[in-house]
Image (tube, rainbow, N blue to C red):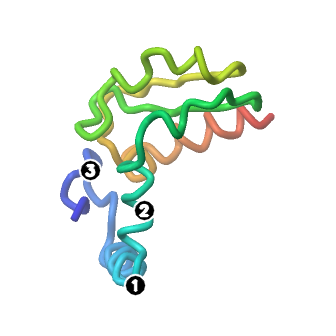
Amino acid sequence: MPFGKTKRKGGYNELDEKEYIDAWSQPGALTGGLNWYRAPVTNFYNEINVPTLVIHSVNDTFFTNKILVGLSDYVKDLKIVCIENVSHWIKMDAPEVLVSNIKEFIG
């Protein structure tokens, strides 16, 4: 479970943990979520023509910075925001930074 892997103390509380565990315990929930990552990369590289925001943790141990290489070849209107000093769990480590970037992007 990711609950101890956030950089910010208190990123998750007991209620958060319970809600995630309850959701992930539903039949097929975890498999469905993981299948997105298991699918062949070629399935994702159709051209994307909508404004797209990627918020990426520079220190992500699951998705390294390599994931961003070449992305602009497929996403024509792309904004990438790289955040330092956060884990994979950006929404728990830096919720203010996440929200401010989303608000700025959607204007």
Q: Mark 1 or 3, which is nearer the eye? A: 1
Three-letter amino acid code at the position of disc 3: Thr
Quadrant in the picture for residue 24:
bottom left
**Mark 2–mark 3 distance (CA, rounded to whole Å):** 20 Å
Q: Position of residue 72 (x, y in %)?
A: 58, 16
Which of disc 1 and disc 2 is earlier in sequence? 1
Q: Which residue is mark 3?
A: 6
Q: Which residue is mark 1?
A: 27
Relative to 61, 102 lies left or right: right
| Mark 1 neighbour class, 10 Å CA radius: few under 14, some 14 to 19, many 20 or more | few
Quadrant in the picture for residue 21:
bottom left
In the structure shown, which secondary structural element does the residue marked by tag 3 occupy?
loop
In the structure shown, which secondary structural element does the residue marked by tag 1 occupy?
loop
Q: Which residue is mark 2?
A: 33
Q: Mark 2 or 3, which is nearer the eye? A: 2
| Vertical side of 5 occupied by 23: above or below | below
Q: Nearer the viewer, residue 31 or 42?
A: 42
Which residue corresponds to the image point at 51% horizontal and 33% vertical from the top-left?
55
Which residue corresponds to the image point at 37% horizontal and 32% vertical from the top-left?
57
Which residue corresponds to the image point at 71% horizontal and 32% vertical from the top-left?
104
Q: Nearer the viewer, residue 79 or 30?
A: 30
Three-letter amino acid code at the position of disc 2: Gly
| Vertical side of 85 occupied by 76: above or below | above
